Amino acid sequence: MKAHTLIFKSVLTAVLVIFSISVFSQTKFMKPSEHFGFKPGTDRMLFDYESLIDYLKTLEKASPRLKLERIGESPMGRPMYIAFFSHPDNIRNLDELKKINRELALNHELSETKRSEYIREGKVFFVATLSMHASEVGPSQAAPLIAHKLVSSQNPDTTGWMNDVVYMMVPSHNPDGMDMVVNHYKGYKGTRYEGSSMPGMYHKYVGHDNNRDFITLSQEDNRAISKIFSQTWFPQVMVEKHQMGSTGPRYFVPPNHDPIAENVDAGIWNWMGIFGMNMIKDMTRNDLAGVSQHYAFDNYWPGSTETCIWKNIIGFLTECASVQYATPIYVEENELSVWGKGLSEYKKSINMPLPWEGGWWRLGDIMNYEVVSTMSIIKTCANHKTDILKFRNDLCREEVNRGKTQKPYYYIMPREQHDESEFVDLVNLLETHGVERYVLQEPVEIENKLYSAGDVVIPLSQPFRPFIKEVMEHQKYPVRHYTPGGEMIKPYDITSWSLPLHRGVKCDEINVKSGVLENALKKIEGAYSVENSIPGNYQAVIFPFSNNESYQAAFMAHEMDLPVNYITNELNIDGKSLDGGAFILSAKGNRNKMNRLIQQLDVPPVFAQEELETEGMKLGFPKIALIETYQHDMDAGWTRYIFDSYHIPFEVIHPGEIKDDGLQEYDVLVFPDTHKSVLLNGKYEREGHYQMSHYPPEYTKGMEDEGLQKVMKFVNDGGKIVSWGRSTELFMGKQTIKHSEEEKEEFSLPVENVASSAKENGFYCPGSFVRVNLDGENVFTRGMPEKTGVFYRGDPVFDTRTPVFDMDRRVFGHYPEEDILLSGFARQEKEIAEQPAWVWLKKGKGELILFSFKPQFRASTQADYKLIFNSLLFSRLRE
């Protein structure tokens, strides 16, 4: 009887499967053209983010092969999603498959039985993040074509692959930017400026630099993406889809060019090569010409989405040649060229075996390349399913073992820090990255150094060991050459990103094993915090200058109409000495507001139980104008982000508005790093050569000489300029102030940029962390140590001279005589030895504060934020 029952059930199951396949094959899934009103990839046609998500939701309702999951919000509040594509059984079983992913990624103690079971039952999760650079519209515009193909295909190869693969599509990594770019394109379509560059930035804050943020994780959209790799889904394979210039190769696939990260396991690089070789093979077989490898892009710097490779994920990027958003271009054969690394000429070579010969290039071509490359990656995932899943757990085991057997073994951050708020923030950032953190429960001595209870320990015997080591150590650029003893291969981006160093947090690298230490550890679960209880009765709260968060508290208090005072001398509170100065907020009549403010902070203030002997001086809050150009001004965007994060009130002024509007209502003008020619003339000018702007003319207005005169009159009459990087060049050389129709003053400030001379003598600094000695006897270094590290790119290099008339200058920070480089790479750094790094200038009744370095570089140099805050709040002329 049992045998008959089993036979009946088997037959019934088979019938149901056949029936479901038959029904599915007859299901009509809405084609993209039906939803959008045009086929994606049609010349001069684009859809926006909301339309894309609506289409995916329509497919989700119709197909058991698709499921959408919300993963977060963009900086401007748009919902962000992952779309899961796979066999219906896998879609129904996503929660269980998610658990398998986590176990393979993080559990180094899996039994062989359980490990084999997970490898057998698990699937390869492959995530693709599309169009994070919103001007690179192709990947997101191709998303509906890929989605429709995966939900409707009856091709046995495709359906077979999807048995073993879960394809995770992030349809737009940058939803805000996608809408900005599409709206800009549509606004100018049909005019002479169709396809022009979008003014401003295709992101709330950081524009193209959203792909430089994956260590710091300052932006909400990047945190949502990073969480996929570090905390939730733990996919095994990842691709970030980009576009590049129009006149080079048509497509880039891995492997990348040298140098590569030394902390990443060799197997990751080998797997990249397998995926890349399969892509170039499949794309070439489909007559897609111009696919290149080992070209332009290195894999040394970990700030992009591919930071996931330091977390044992097989991650890589692709780059497709661009059009003018959706407007086709024609490329003549003689216009094709190559740049960067890996291809010395645009010819058939091992790195580009089938060159593209020129002609029309359309958005539809981009879509075709994206569809074929995506299907190739899915196929490779399926064909190597067992090896990929095994590799993920192998790496988990190997990295944990390396952490136990290879130095360094631990990083220890003492509880007592100069900036306690940055220490707390760093400990919590590591948790966001999926790193396990521990706290010492009792004192421990290691190599004659005593560590205290409360110190935070990061063991390297963790699955994400490569990431921990990469971001906690000081960087040393791996110098490689094109030929033996020949030209050095220069880095694609920066060469320093050490989290403790950039944040000014003390951190010791421990190169000996200690059982005593390990026995004294307690794991930190969830968010790390220091005690922040508010006493029932207090008279005032004191926020030390040493904490960045104290400045945030001061600006928040101003926002809440709470009066803020400050002191610069030593203060003793209930036996606790504060010797660096602080902000003071009185509790009289303000206790409820004060309590709300304190509850928003990571680090508690010092509470005074009795009336203070001194109330200090009243803090004035200046009216600030931030000068931001329309030409994708990323450094200004980062500055806006920091100002907003610290509740610093400001207004944006564009350079073209300066000559028409008065500046009298402002106290401070902030000039972030921007090319002088853009500020002055609204377009880039290099060595006197005209460079045509790609922006509509209304966005290419500079301040011109008339505006610069107004800026200098603003200073002369008592205003303040704060400027860094290239924009400081605006204040070099001959200056003019028109005092009246009859009176015109000509002068030059006692500072100049001598970078060209340093470069001629071999100085090269591609973005490194270098040492600066500070003059502690001035108002602008409050809360700072005597020495700091700064992020520097080698230009400008300041020199000063003796002033005349109503001008003065002081050097408030200089590069030391030796041991200048802290992290990264510099060549012939002796050229800047003892040179000014930071200069204060007086002109008339006003002052200028000029930094040769970027004190807020990509929101990643918290060690120097106080230099900005102090420059905004305090004045050497008025104290």
Image (spheres, grey):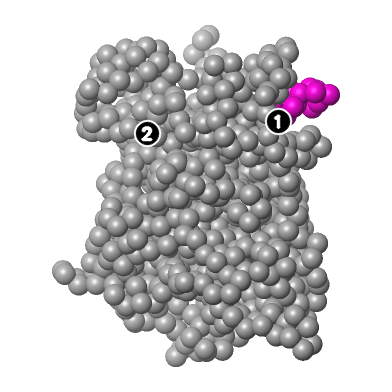
Q: Indicate the position of residue 352 as horizontal and vertical percent values.
A: 35, 73
Cα gap from disc 2 to disc 1, whole angstroms: 36 Å
Q: Amino acid at mark 1?
A: Glu
Q: Secondary structure at mark 2?
A: loop
Res 123 visible: no
Q: Nearer the viewer, residue 694 or 655?
A: 655
Judging by the rendered image, the residue that carries numbered circle 1 is 615
Q: Does 321 appear above or below 171?
A: below
Three-letter amino acid code at the position of disc 2: Cys
Residue 732's spot in the image, x, y percent?
Answer: 54, 76
Q: Nearer the viewer, mark 2 or mark 1?
A: 1
Query: Magenta stretch: residue 282 in it?
Result: no
Answer with the quarter of the image where residue 66 lies.
Answer: top right
In the displayed image of the protein, which residue is found farthest to the front? 805
Query: Magenta residues?
Result: 585-600
- Ranked by sequence position, the earlier of labels 2 and 1 is 2
153 or 691, which is in the foreground? 691
In the image, residue 74 above or below residue 191: above
Q: Is residue 596 magenta?
A: yes
User: Residue 409 placed where, x, y %?
Assistant: 27, 29
